[in-house]
Amino acid sequence: MPLPPGTPLGPYQILAPLGAGGMGEVYRARDTRLGRDVAIKVLPPHLAASPEVRARFEREARTISQLDHPHICTLFDVGRAPGEVGSGGIDYLVMELLEGETLAHRLEKGPLPVGEVLSIGTQIADALDRAHRAGVVHRDLKPGNVMLTKSGVKLMDFGLARTALAAAASGALTESPTVSRPLTAEGTIVGTFQYMAPEQLEGRDADARSDLWALGCVLYEMATGKRAFEGKSQASLIAAIMERRPTPPSLLVPLLPPALDQVVQQCLAKDPDERIQTAHDVKLELQWIASGGSQAGVPAPLAARRRSRERLAWAMAGILALAVVALGAWVLRPTPAPRVIRFEVGPPRGTTRLSWPRLSPDGKLLAFLATDSAGSVRIWVRSLDGIDAHPLDAVVGSARPFWSPDSRWLAFINDGKLMKVAVAGGPAISICDAPGGFDGTWGRSGWILFDGANANDSIRGAPASGGAPTGVTFLDRAHGETNHAWPFFLPDGRHFLFVDFRAGGVNEVRVGRLGSRENRAVGRTDSRAEYAPPGYLVYESAGVLMAQRFDPRTARTRGDPVPVGDLASGSVGLFSVSSGGGLAFRPRGIQAASRLLWVDRNGHIIGEAAPPDQYEDVVLSPDGARVAVSIVGEQPSQRDIWVRDLRRGVSSRLTFDPGDEFAPVWSPDGNRIAYGALRGDEMHCYVRSAWGGAEDSLGRAAGFYEGPFGWSGAANILTISHVTATNHWDVYALSPEGRQPPRPLLQSPFNERAGRLSPDGRWLAYSSDESGRDEVYVVPYPGPGPKIRISTGGGEAPQWRGDGKELFFQGPDQSMLAADIRAGTTFVAGTPKILFRIPLAAPGLYRGYRCAPSPDGQRFLVNASSGEATAGRFIVATNWTSELKKK
């Protein structure tokens, strides 16, 4: 029953009603002791009648009363007065009386300016942080519980919703304590549900992360004027919360900073474990955006001043007019073009094998991969105005990093997961599953795109905040498309470049769009492509880095391409551009020199087999007396096969063709060598005498690439890796004597490579990425029979000991491993053991063997990185596009 004015409640006197809701009536009252006005909430009978609820209510009220914070409505008192309400009197709360309007009332007028969104959001997050640190969870954060006052935000009804839910356990969910009217015509339940986290709807206990979900909903509504989740009924609303992701705010309000999208999406992750974990982090993110760190093209302070633009424009016009009169002569003088600055970045101390330079979008940082002294490949980050680089915590293997739009995170794919790691430090965080794939891109829309699960897949995508990946592009196999790769977002965060691979080697750069199956062709390419403001497409052609005028709106190039620099051999991805006008690439002529070292089974160096050179593939002859290697020449992608007599220390060149020869393998008698070679636009297998002589072409399947990995005497076949019409690797058999086309040994939707038969010709070892990363397997030859996995933590390039009693393979961390083998009519493999780790030289184009065991397995010839400065360097240029305008 409503209380009339003048009703006493202890030392308080009712003055006037303020509102009512499912949790009771709210009144303006006078504190007769202190002479101040307060707000009093009178609890309804169904709560006041329960002694357990009252006791719990009083405990929480005492806790909340201690939350002394400028953005939390202060709870002064809790009491009981005699009366007719309830079974024993009137239970009430005494709170700070707030003058202003609720955020719900303000939102009825539409979205807030971005400056207000960031300010209000920061204050709410600060209040939540204070409460969460005290162990108090709000559980019913919504615009109706946020009061906007002259002194700032005041968060109301802190922690009391928990009591309401406990008391209502036997009935329906009710409205929050202070809402005096529903936020929609659907009623109080819909108004409550719209800000509930999935775990609350599932009946699980709410914690601090549930408040952060609600905060994400409030931020979304403030920024867009729309609720993050809508539904015509309770069921449809719950389904939207549980299953759907809201449209990014910046797509509804274009002037919003994209970094706000990311904060909202991090708050609205369905799984609490994948959600941003503390209100303090939300506060810091919002403060950072407000300081202008969004890189959105329109910084947050500009949007906050949109109301004063017209006035500012008039003032600026007057100032400019005076400037023209006073400084006309200077205005007419031509403005000098920004100066182009170029400099080198070398390897950090103790590292080797620099690769994959990645400039941050703001152009201030350079990330790259380098191998440390322990043989671990890490991401290193260096400020362009500094000298030293520092490694991040994550060990990434062969993953290729790419930046977040705000330049604060680096993402990469490793061990079947899409990961991210903060540049400021900390462990890597899993975003979603990503079986296979190498390259990715992180857009302003909050989405990450990456290569598909295998080499004949399309582009996949997932929100940066987490979620199951989905297909973004769709292969048109009827027109010869075999796979899509190398995505790169354009500035709007919705369109993106990618490479469309086709049967026959005719590949195209295309432009796709999020949410659409349609895409447009840009032009043919033999590499990945990136977009550089103010309007250039950057890509590689025949070892030269090129830039060409490009309009991202029409997806059309114009004019002639202009050379920018010569890239290192085989460096399809070793360049990067930034929106801040930067360019980084690995130049030609500095590929890592390497050394051929003899090591024992413990990795101790026992001798050097050849002087330093640019070695790639390393294969010992059957008797261990000679080694065949491929050596990189002066021109990019130009290798030749050499044979070195290890006893005499004499090397002889075997191939002289101006093309590219690689991946040598010895015949069982040591008299011939087979190898792969590039002739025109095709790669095929050839064979010639190990002492020199004419080259013989082996059987081929026209148009498909192939390279050898083993030569079995027992089976009289060459095992080759063959790229099929679906653009993935399979293991084929090829006759070393005739000209028959190759026949398949292993075929699947995955990549099978490096097949080698055991000395007795009965077992085939190979690597496959069917688990999401390369592992070593063995199957019987010619089959059928069971498949046996050998490696347990990744592996490739298997090789047999001369007697077949051990299988060696290379691990993902620069290690050489060995597994004992017992084979006859059955096959039994022991647990692989790490023999040693040595920083290996860069792999060849076809993952050639970089560590060759002697026939008895007691020593190894290792293609080791030299560890010198020649292990890699990058060229970095600033303002580089200003030179293109002159050409």
Image: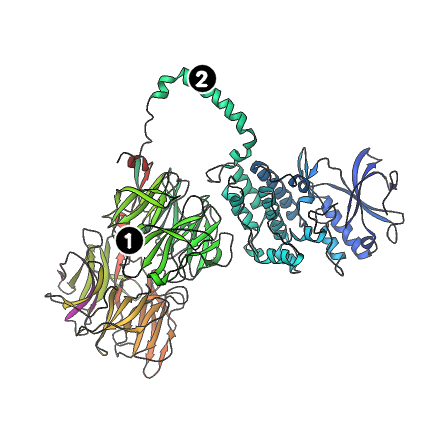
User: Which label was assigned to residue 158?
Assistant: none
Above or below residue 135? Residue 5 is above
Q: Quadrant of the C terminus?
A: top left
Residue type at the position of mark 2? Leu
Q: Nearer the viewer, residue 519 or 98?
A: 519
What is the magenta range? 653-678
For the question of whether residue 352 can be seen, the reply is: no
Q: Is residue 522 magenta?
A: no
Image spot of residue 65 (x, y percent): 73, 44
- Is 595 positioned to the left or the right of 55 in the image? left
Q: How has the structure been colored for display?
A: rainbow
Instruction: Residue under label 1, please give it.
Output: 526
Image spot of residue 95 (x, y percent): 76, 41
Q: Nearer the viewer, residue 109 or 858?
A: 109
Instruction: Residue under label 2, please give it.
Output: 322
Image spot of residue 322 (x, y percent): 45, 17
